[in-house]
Image (cartoon, rainbow, N blue to C red):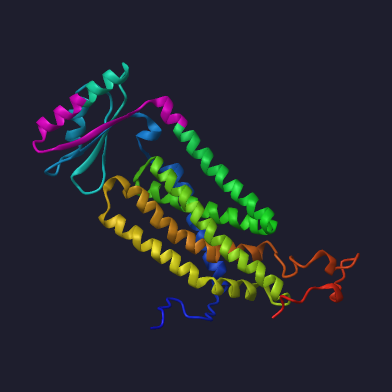
Amino acid sequence: MRPLKLVPDNTNIPFLKWRNVAMGLSLLLIIGSIVLCFVKGFNLGIDFVGGQQTRVTFSQPVDVETLRQRVEALGYGEATIQRSGDTTEYSVRTPLPEGGEEAANKAASAIRTTIQQAYPGAQVAGAQSVSGKVSEELFRNGAISLTLAMLAIALYIWFRFEWQFGVGALFALFHDVALTLGFFALTQLEFDLNIVAAILTIIGYSLNDTIVVYDRIRENMRKYRKMEMGELLDLSINETLSRTVVTSLSIGIVLAVLLLLGPDVIFGFTAAMLLGIVIGTFSSVYVSAAILLWLRLKPDSFLPKEATGPKGAERTDSVDFKDMP
């Protein structure tokens, strides 16, 4: 029985024919995502804003404004009500009361009692408390971790390949992160530490896919030194297309199942991962490869140094042709 092939052998799809359209779309999405982040902001979870959060599942639809008024009547400050998952599950966030753990437990107990008395059948999953100082540290450390991860990756690729590859990889990672952040600003899904973990995972996945394509580009540059760069890039992408499609599709199926059937507590993480797989696959094909043309990468970038004379003239007698087809 012959194995199933999702991508036929010897594909010859002219991906870079549409590079200007793809890059223009990417730039528009990046700009739109940045604008959304500044205009709408994020629905920051308790990890980043501090306070106390109580998750409640109601047995019937509730009026959010009425629920907010009843919680605020307890005197613990302004309440933020956020629906999560289906239409009957909500998170109730209030400022953390002064007095330490004892005061926090008392406030959680009062909120639970009030909700259960006003809404018979409501199930309170529990309360979580994070101090303001801890939340500030978490937000700062999360932002630093994302920035350092992207810079370290760009430096690695710079030394591993050429500077054009480092710039291309860094732009592709910025593209993936910006679009993911824009998605959370648009949908107002809760943005917590789970989402930071998802973005770091997206960076790792996108980088892995990009390096596979870059490594094939470098190999082909050594083999086909007289081939036009656009044609060489298309060849490299097509040669790695089967691996890219199979990997992305297998991970995407698992994430889609988790998104539909998984618990609500990982809904945001799963949504970020699924979006990141789609964006990362797109960027490894159109963004990271296409940008090499604009950075004027040339087919002779990997010629051995001894292949050129003192004035830069090519010396064909010293070139190693063992990798030539």
Quadrant where the C terminus lies? Answer: bottom right
The residue positioned 23% from the left and 33% from the top of the image is 126
Query: Can you say whether 217 is above or below 83 in the image?
Result: below
Quadrant of the rendered structure where residue 196 is?
Answer: top left
Q: Position of residue 165 (x, y in %)?
A: 64, 59
Quadrant of the image for the N terminus?
A: bottom left
Please identify the residue farthest to the front as the structure is shown: 1
Q: Quadrant of residue 308?
A: bottom right
Closer to us: 63 or 177: 177
Q: Position of residue 286 (x, y in %)?
A: 54, 65
Residue numbers of the magenta segment = 109-137
Q: Is residue 79 covered in magenta?
A: no
Q: Furthest residue to the left?
A: 120
Residue 134 drawn in magenta: yes
So how many labels did they put on this image? Answer: 0
State the residue in front, 222 or 94: 222
Residue depicted at 53% across the width and 78% down the height: 13
Name the residue rendered at 9%, 38% in the picture. 121
Query: Which residue: 44% across, 51% down?
Result: 180
Residue 104 position, x and y percent, is 27, 22
